[in-house]
Image: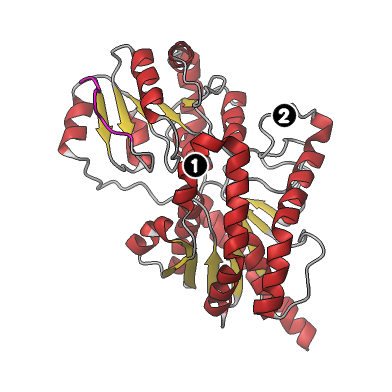
Amino acid sequence: MNLLILTYGTEGDTSPLIVLGHALRAAGNTVHILGDARTLGLAHQLGVPASPLAGDVRKLHADWGRTGAKGAAKSLVKLANEQCDAWMRDALAAAEGCDAVVTSGLAGFVGLSVAERLKVPVIGAGMIPLTPSREFPSPFLPSLKIPGWANRASLALTNQLLWLAFRGALNQARADVLGLPPRKALWNDHPMLYGISPTVLPRPVDWPATAHLCGQWMLPTQSDYEPSPDLARFLAAGEAPVYMGFGSMTGIDMPKIVDAAVTALDGRRAVFSGGWNGMHDAGLPDTILRVDRTPHDWLFPRMAAIIHHGGSGTTHSALRAGRPSIVMPFVGDQPFWAARLRHLGVAPAAVSPARPDPKALAAALRFVGRESVVKRAQALGRHMAQEDGLAAGVKIVMSLLERSTRLCRASRG
């Protein structure tokens, strides 16, 4: 099969789809990926053909610490609407001759439209649950107390709001680029593939058969990975440290967060990771080592606890490593994952990154140090280790495409 994977978002949004694409190639398929230029490094590293889409998601992140969740949502909508025409043209060119389109993120509606134009199967994909259910509220309404009976409606509502925000620019591009009539309603009958672990979020009993929960999409652990000499010496010099890193989050007051963390750690050993936020090591005590990008699957099992932003990927990797978390969520679905980890008993209540409180962080560190919490995280990590999200994802994609091919042949005959 010849597949196009179309996505737009941060590295945390894009990397799992690159990994899925790599697994699909290993299964004998041809794969091409389109995404934000800054997020395609892993594709180039793995040899997966990839091309950049217009826009710069990192530039948007620089303003998120100042504008907050509402500002972040507006800036993402603005970016997607401004680039919709360009994304549509690039996706149409890349999809010519494809057997199917896998679409995700801010470019999701573009992929659905291109597949419609080319009359090929389309599969939605992602790491955030978008299929409504009675079992959890919308991941995009973190500040509201949603009663259980309104869970399903809350996600249906946010899906509809997203559609309304993108509809105008999308329909204009459908007409100009694809020659298609305007779309009047949100798509709701295509299959959805989620790189989410059922250990983190069990599959809801009221989900339709078109929604598939695979497990985390991650590469096999790099057994031959060699850490830097500084990191190797630091890990060997004492007890397991605490990890702190915020991935693609930028535009945040990192000095304030670092100061609060140093105070809360009170001499305890820690590893601070930079990511996109420019965290630097000025003024750090000898008990804290700053590191550059290090594979989570190698590093996290060597940590005592993980302080992170609550992105879906980091949430999964922390729990898979069998380590408790302290979550400092910034935007989007991050409070949702913070709540999931707290529900599982492996994280305390989320700590505000906007108002980092050393006392709150110190209390959170005491929580993740409890023997019962550590054992709970280890047990869930062992359970997650039995999952193979990539194998499940490849199997489901191939099954869906084979079924679509049979239906097409039947309709023609």
Horizontally, is 56 left or right of 82 in the view?
A: left
The quadrant the C terminus occupies is bottom right
The quadrant the N terminus occupies is bottom right
Horizontally, is 235 left or right of 173 in the view?
A: left
Per the model, the C-alpha gap separating discs 2 and 1 is 23 Å
Q: Residue 287 in the image: state x and y as whole percent.
A: 24, 20
Q: Residue 228 in the image: state x and y as whole percent.
A: 19, 40
- Look at 73% across and 68% down and name the residue there: 171
- Residue 72 picture quarter: top right
Q: Amino acid at mark 1?
A: Asp
- Look at 53% across and 58% down and name the residue there: 8
In this figure, which residue is indicated by the disc labeled 2?
Answer: 144
For the record, the magenta segment spans: 279-287
Q: Nearer the viewer, residue 274 or 77?
A: 77
In this figure, which residue is indicated by the disc labeled 1?
Answer: 63
- Look at 56% across and 72% down and name the residue there: 91
Q: Main secondary structure of the magenta part?
A: loop
